[in-house]
Each structure stands twice: as C-alpha cells, then as structure tokens.
Image (tube, helix red, strand yellow):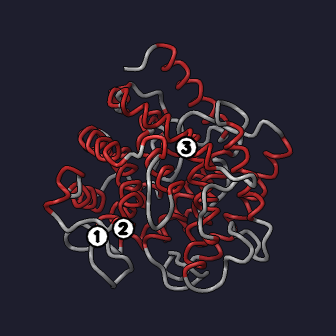
Amino acid sequence: MADRHTVSRRGFLRLAAAGGAAGALGYAGHDPGRAQEPTPADTGAEFITPATQAAIDGGLAFLDRSQNPDGSFGHSSQGAAVGVASLCGLALMAGGHQPGRGRYGRAVSRAVDYVLASATGPTPGLLSLPDAGGFGRQHQQSAYSHGFGALFLAEVSGMMPDPARQKAVRSTLEQAVAYTVEARNREGGWRYRPREDADVSVTVAQMMALRAARNAGLFVRKSVVDAAADYVRGCQMPDGGFSYMKGYGSSAFARSAASVVGLYSAGVYTGREIDRGLRYVQQYLPVRRFSFREIPDYHYLYGHYYAALAMWTAGGEYWTEWFPAIRDDLLGRNRGAGGWSDDTNGAAYATAMALIILQLPNNYLPILQK
C-alpha cells in the first residue's frame, strides 16, 4: 500500500496532468466521473510489490541511459524511431515524470524535441523521419510512429514549462491530427498509406491518438470517431475476437485486445461487442496462455500493452485478475538493469511497453485516468 506522501504526490500529478490537458477528459460517451481520484483498490496500487517497484525503477533508469543525444532511444530502425521515442516518453511519464519535472523530466523533454523535429519532413503533419515514408516495412513503421507520436504529444500538451515549446507542441499536434483525419480511408480506418485499405492495428493507434487529442482540447469531428468505431466493430468475429481486416483473417489475441481499446477510445464502454471482446481476450491471461495457441514473441508486448489497457478500463475483476498475472509474467522476463528485451523491436521498445503496463496503477497518464 502506498504511504500518505506517495498518495499525495500521485494526486498532485494527476491534477497537474488533467489541468495540462485543459481538464478536457470528456469524450463521446465518456463519463466525467471516471476522472475522479480513485482509491488504491480501484487501481490495483496494492499490487505494486517491492519487487515490482524495483523492476520499474531499473527500467526507468535503463531508458534514461538508452536515450541518444538527439532524444531518440536505443537503436530503433528508422521508420520506428519516432514511435519508440514516443512510447519511451509515455513510459517515463507513467512514472510521474513530466517535461522538466522529476528525475527523468529532462529525458521526457528531449523525447518531445525529437518528436517535434520529426514533423519537419516533406509530408505536412506526418510524425516520422523524413526518409522513412517510402514503401515496405519503413512505411509500415512510420504509420505506427505517427499514431504513437501524436498520442505522446497530446499527453504532454499543457505540461511544457516553456510557453514557446508548449505552442510548438500544440501546433505540431494540430497538424498531426489534420494529417490523421485526412489519411483515413472510405471505411473510416487507417493503414500504412493514406486512404488505402484499413486494418485494426493501425486504426486503433490512430484512434488512441485522436482520443488523447480531443482530451487535450483539439476538435475532431464525431463522425470521424464514429466511422472508426464502426470499422472496428465490422472486424469482430463470431468468437468475440477481431480479425486483422474487415472480411479478412481470423481472431487473434493482439489485434483483439487492440480492438477493444479502440472501441473504448471512441467512447464505447458498454455493449455486446465489448463484453464479447473482453471474454475473448481473457482466454490469454498469462497463466493460461499455454492452453491456447502461443502468442508470437514479436506480438507479446504489443498485445499485452493493449490487453492491460483494456482490462484497466474495464476495471473490477477484469483488472484485479489480469494485472497480477501480467505483472508476474513481466517480472519473470525482466533482465534486471537491462530492462526488457525484444529481438524484433529492441530493448528500448520492450522496456517502454513493460513499464507502461506495470505503472498503470499510478494513474498518471491523462488518457488513462479514472
């Protein structure tokens, strides 16, 4: 259980974050009461054991050591670099560190600068490296980077101590949102290239960014959000899971967890599609995973990132059963001072994803506040 000092600090940081986002935590279908101060039992703060906090502390220190002079992290491939930097920034913020504030506040500020610099490429509004917009895997990675980058900028909006930098964040975020809205296809979703066929994975990344942007006070038409939610709904399968694309593929853990989060991001908190989706994802509770088809290693952290967000939002027994299970699984995969590893996406990405999951009970990120 957190002591009185810790609870007070958490409450202050949550109020600062909410104020930094203009207090605009409301969204279509969103209950304003969800932004109230939660009790430890609501968040699962009591599940952050000393071993868990030690792993978190080690992971945060690892990210700080892994940051490059330009604000990027580790050795991410070019197309993914902005997305990885954004996830690392979010992971540091999930520990209570804000731009210029906290032990790792400087690292967050440098990550912001890196993401802002990525917006200077030839495609207005695209948050990716200038030459990462070609075809193939780099273009695929740049689509995700843009979504995570816009999410990160929306979360730090209003938190910048320097008015000039805050203005830069706001302006860049507005352009990024305009790019996102323009890039959607006729079905209301997104994929690797603007206006091409959609998939739920890229679509949910953009939906979370739009949700955070609206929380920060930016205007996004409700019709854009509703169309994206309809696309995700159209991918739900008879077993409650979600296919990769509408009319193509079968249910799988990672895409199904992401789809539930996408619906939450659109303000859809209840309904048959949510209940069925949560039940499908529940099958992959870490202690049960060997009863089902194995999750590919390169989807493990990605899938559990979304699964934890889904269970966090669902709350109740969904959360109190899920968090201890994924906590213990992540602690078993921890490399100590080396954070977490991912052979496909690198240690900075893996550590950021693990830290976001483990620090959800802190309730610091504006988009996740209850």
The three-letter code of the residue at mark 3 reads Phe
Q: Nearer the viewer, residue 85 or 54?
A: 54
Residue that extends furthest to the top in the rendered view of this protein: 4
Quadrant (top left/top right/bottom left/bottom right) for the N terminus: top left
Q: Residue at x 71, y 50 (%)?
A: 112
Q: Earlier in the sequence, mark 1 or mark 3?
A: 3
Q: Earlier in the sequence, mark 2 or mark 3?
A: 3
Disc 3 target residue: 62
Q: Are marks 2 and 1 in contact (CB under 8 Å)?
A: yes
Q: Nearer the viewer, mark 1 or mark 3?
A: 3
Q: Are marks 2 and 3 in contact (CB under 8 Å)?
A: no
The three-letter code of the residue at mark 1 reads Ala
The three-letter code of the residue at mark 2 reads Arg
Residue 183 location, quadrant: bottom right
* Label 1 environment density (alpha carbons within 10 Å; few <14, some 14–19, many ≥20): some
Q: Nearer the viewer, mark 2 or mark 3?
A: 3
Disc 2 target residue: 255
Quadrant (top left/top right/bottom left/bottom right) for the C terminus: top left
Disc 1 target residue: 252
- Give how far across and how far down residue 343 sits, in percent: 44, 64
